[in-house]
Image (cartoon, rainbow, N blue to C red):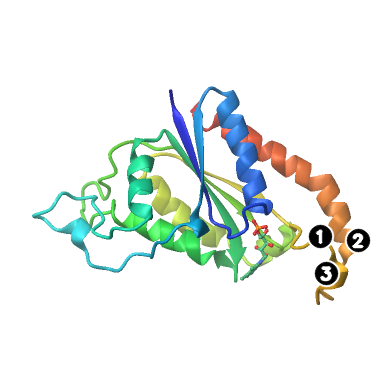
């Protein structure tokens, strides 16, 4: 049976990112795959420590020397058939947990070779699902898609497969906006957007999960 692994790069286990990942996994499961959801923030791990062990000529390329909670997960990802990464946008970037995860997974399989820069053992279809407070217009204005195309490009090259993406804009941060200082946000407009758009974003995530093994 094929396996799809989803990585929740948000510390919130029941937030927007988790919910969209669950939808994507539901789609994958209904297309016949075995599924696994990993909450990054419940793991004890660090980002790459730049030891370059993974690139030494006298060692097996593609092996990360760091031993922590991410070690068995990287091994499971090498055996999986697709990978879906859920990313809350923090300060116009990936959350630090997701950034550290990507460093570990991608850099350990990347070599400084003119020929084939990857030692990843297979073609692994992969996708990023981003969630953010920003609107679609903000994303355009700040060139976020162009910025995120950089790590997506590395993922595609190193994991030897197409990298898909899905953007969920204008997400809800808390259930009651009156309880928090949030005067830049119009809670009614936010609620109306969520009511209309979040179900569509969930459907898009479901479809992504359903199709990720199909290509
Ligand atoms: C530390 C931090 C920084 C954030 N920075 C941004 C940002 O730069 N742009 C943005 O659109 N949203 C930002 N947000 C909002 C989150 O991206 C948004 O609420 C996201 O949907 C949270 O996902 P979750 O519900 O899965 O945790 C930030 C949130 C936090 C906690």
Residue at position x 19%, y 50% in the image: 61
Q: What residue is pinned by disc 2? A: 188
Q: What residue is pinned by disc 1? A: 175
**Residue 135: x and y, percent?**
74, 60
The CA distance from mark 1 to mark 2 is 12 Å
Mark 3 or mark 1: which is in front? 1
Quarter of the image with the N terminus is top left
Q: Earlier in the sequence, mark 3 or mark 1?
A: 1
Q: Secondary structure at mark 1?
A: loop
* Residue 197 relative to residue 188: left or right: left
Q: Residue furthest right?
A: 188
Tell which quarter ligand 1 is in.
bottom right
Residue at position x 39%, y 53% in the image: 154
**Residue 86: x and y, percent?**
56, 51
Residue at position x 67%, y 52% in the image: 14
The residue carrying pointer 3 sits among few (fewer than 14), some (14 to 19) or many (20 or more) residues within 10 Å by Cα, namely few
* Residue 107 relative to residue 193: left or right: left
The CA distance from mark 2 to mark 3 is 9 Å
Can you tell me whether the CB of the residue at mark 2 lies under 8 Å from the nearest atom of ligand 1?
Answer: no
Residue 185 badge: 3
């Amino acid at each position: 049976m094929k396996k799809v692994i989803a990585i929740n790069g948000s510390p919130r286990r029941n937030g927007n990112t988790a919910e969209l990942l669950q939808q994507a996994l539901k789609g994958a499961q209904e297309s016949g795959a075995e599924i696994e959801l990993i909450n990054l923030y419940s793991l004890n791990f660090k980002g790459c420590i730049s030891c370059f062990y993974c690139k030494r000529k006298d060692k097996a390329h593609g092996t990360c020397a760091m031993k922590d909670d991410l070690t068995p997960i990287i091994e499971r990802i090498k055996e999986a058939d697709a990978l879906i990464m859920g990313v809350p946008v923090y300060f116009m970037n990936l959350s630090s947990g997701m950034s550290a995860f990507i460093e570990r997974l991608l850099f350990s399989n990347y070599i400084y070779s003119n020929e084939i820069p990857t030692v990843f053992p297979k073609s692994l279809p992969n996708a990023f699902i981003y969630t953010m407070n920003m609107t679609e217009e903000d994303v355009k204005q700040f060139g976020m898609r162009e910025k995120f195309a950089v790590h997506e490009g590395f993922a595609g090259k190193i994991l030897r497969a197409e990298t898909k993406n899905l953007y969920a804009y204008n997400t809800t941060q808390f259930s009651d906006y009156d309880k928090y200082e949030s005067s830049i946000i119009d809670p009614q407009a936010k609620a109306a957007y969520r009511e209309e758009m979040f179900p569509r974003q969930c459907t898009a995530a479901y479809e992504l999960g359903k199709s990720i093994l199909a290509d």
